Image: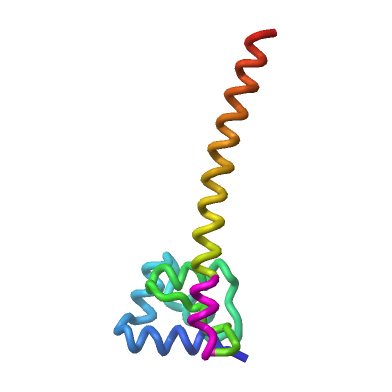
Amino acid sequence: MVNIGEIIRDYCKTDKTSVYDLAKLLNLTPTTLYRSLRRNSLTIDRLQQISRALNHNFFIHFIENSASSEEQLLKLTTENKELTAKVASLQKEITYLQEIISLLNARQ
């Protein structure tokens, strides 16, 4: 099992970022962050906040086969781009449909 707290502490040492500085970036007390990092798990939300603060994707450490991790990351990145494009398209469609509804309501 991955000990994500240990991985984050190791990354902070390598990145020369103290846990104290990371706590400030996350608007947490250092004690609260130290306690979180000592646990075996973190919430997804907290891990996402830490990933953003340190500009490192800590979720990658949960991919079991490290040989294919780059391939999986590329696949996820591609899927993310496709889904972002679909969301933008759907938002345009919603705006268009709202305009049609507005015009139909005005005709009544």
Question: In the image, is residue 8 above or below residue 26?
Answer: below
Foreground of the two, 108 or 82:
82
Prevailing secondary structure class for the magenta stretch in the rendered image: helix
* Quadrant where the N terminus is found in the figure: bottom right
Residue at 41% x, 73% y is 23
Question: In the image, is residue 85 above or below residue 105?
Answer: below
Of all residues, the one furthest to the left in this rendering is 16
Looking at the image, how many numbered discs can be counted on the residues? 0
Of all residues, the one furthest to the top in this rendering is 108
User: Magenta span covers which residues?
Assistant: 66-75
* Quadrant where the C terminus is found in the figure: top right
Q: Identify the coloring.
A: rainbow
Residue at 41% x, 89% y is 10
Q: Position of residue 55 (x, y in %)?
A: 38, 72
Q: Position of residue 35 (x, y in %)?
A: 52, 81
Instruction: Let me know if residue 36 is in the magenta part.
Output: no
Q: Position of residue 6 (x, y in %)?
A: 49, 89
Question: In the image, is residue 54 above or below residue 3?
Answer: above
Residue at 32% x, 80% y is 17
Residue at 34% x, 75% y is 21
Res 22 quadrant in image: bottom left
Foreground of the two, 52 or 105:
105
Foreground of the two, 99 or 42:
99
Instruction: Let me know if residue 69 is in the magenta part.
Output: yes
Q: Position of residue 49 (x, y in %)?
A: 47, 67
